[in-house]
Image (tube, rainbow, N blue to C red):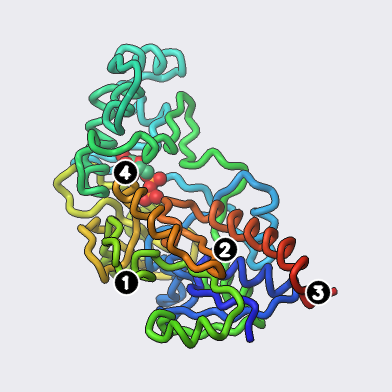
Amino acid sequence: MYDYVIVGAGLFGSVFARQMTDAGAKCLIIEKRNHIGGNCYSANLGGIHVHRYGPHIFHTNDDAVWQYVNRFARFSRFSYRPKVNFRGELYSFPINLNTLHQLWGVTTPQQAKERLEAERVKIEQPANLEQWALSQVGRELYETFVYGYTKKQWGREPSELPCSIIRRLPIRLTWNDDYFNDRYCGIPEGGYTKLFESMLQGIPVETEVDFLSDRCRFESMGKSIVYTGPLDRLFDYELGASDWRGLRFKHQLISQPDYQGVAAVNYTDAETPYTRCIEHKHFEPLECDHTVVTREYPADWSVGDEMYYPVNNDAGEALQKRYAAKLPKNYLIGGRLATYRYFDMHQVVASAMHMAKQQIRSVETIYPLRRVA
Ligand code: UDP
């Protein structure tokens, strides 16, 4: 009998399994895919670590989370500085003094501040993503950097989306073009899959096994079930399906050493069918005469497709709550799919560490965990 049967070998399931195993619990991980790592998974293509499910850049402000992930891999010094391609013109991004210099010729923070003040649309309380962006940067920047990209990514008008989606992007009046404000940022050397292999050492993982195809048996194998898949699927969509945005990835091996000179170029016009082009070797520089790029095509989602971005509208949130209320008492949930949250990796690590800590506290009062020294 296992203490925990963990459904999903992604970031939440793997961190939780590691923490509980180190505390002496017996864990089994069941994974539907043929690999570990969830959407962080990286595949080795001719020595290049390809982020198969979209670019993953680990960034955090949390000392404990950073120290934790560094136990399993060495992280390279990487900072994310994508470029924007808008109708053939290239710009620095996220919006910073380089960008405003390119667009308007301003050269100092004060000039940029004055120009932005003049451009901003006066909206007291922005009620949606479009209003928020217009109130921060004005129409020209909104149309160049936000409108097309957002509409493609979410399949909706930005005026129908919440401000929360875009608030995380910095707008800077300095020459700093780093995408993230966090203290720590990097990419695990050797790829994410190697990090997961190290994290899961000594923990049994069964890949290509669908928990739901033999649910009763797996439930009988564990005192608790840690479920990291989508809740609607767990309940066979009996209350309906949650809404997600899908993605299709087109990977291409190119016989040249460098295709675009940077890890990511965002295509922000509404006409180009993909949102961004990722060149993986820029995450972990490698001298070789070939390169791999991935174009990301946002797609409508329907039941059975891979889930990428939760559409957190009121209906989606309400459905998630109704499903959560139906969970059996010995079920724990975590991660992006099960909680229906647009999480960054560091948030998933923190939540898995937190849940493990809570378990160790509460379980110790019921039965003593076999503590390791
Ligand atoms: N966004 C944009 N233009 C860009 C990049 C992002 O308007 O070039 C907006 C878009 O609405 C997106 C949001 O900012 O959904 C968050 O972008 P982020 O890069 O954080 O998304 P992720 O990397 O998670 O796909």
- Residue 276 position (above or below residue 281): above
Tell me the kind of residue under disc 3. Answer: Arg
The disc placed on residue 121 is none
How crowded pointer 2 is (Cα within 10 Å; few <14, some 14-19, many 20+) is rated as many
Mark nearer the N terminus (1 vs 4): 1
- Label 3 element class: loop
Query: For disc 2, does the CB lie below 8 Å from ligand 1?
Result: no
How crowded pointer 3 is (Cα within 10 Å; few <14, some 14-19, many 20+) is rated as few
Residue 305 drawn at (x, y percent): 27, 68
The disc placed on residue 371 is 3
- Label 2 element class: strand
Mark nearer the N terminus (1 vs 3): 1
Tell me the kind of residue under disc 4. Answer: Asp
Mark nearer the N terminus (4 vs 3): 4
Residue at horizontal 81%, vertical 75%? 372
Foreground mark, 2 or 4, reads: 4
Distance from the alpha carbon under mark 1 to that under mark 4:
21 Å
Residue 30 drawn at (x, y percent): 50, 80
State how many labels appear.
4
Please say if the residues under marks 2 and 4 sit with CB atoms less than 8 Å apart.
no
Residue with the mark numbered 1: 236
Observer-nearest of 8 and 93: 8
Residue with the mark numbered 4: 314
Residue with the mark numbered 2: 188
Residue 19 drawn at (x, y percent): 68, 68
Query: For disc 1, does the CB lie below 8 Å from ligand 1?
Result: no
Residue 258 drawn at (x, y percent): 37, 60
- Quadrant field for ligand 1: top left
Q: Quadrant of residue 322?
A: bottom left
Tell me the kind of residue under disc 2. Answer: Pro
Distance from the alpha carbon under mark 1 to that under mark 2:
37 Å
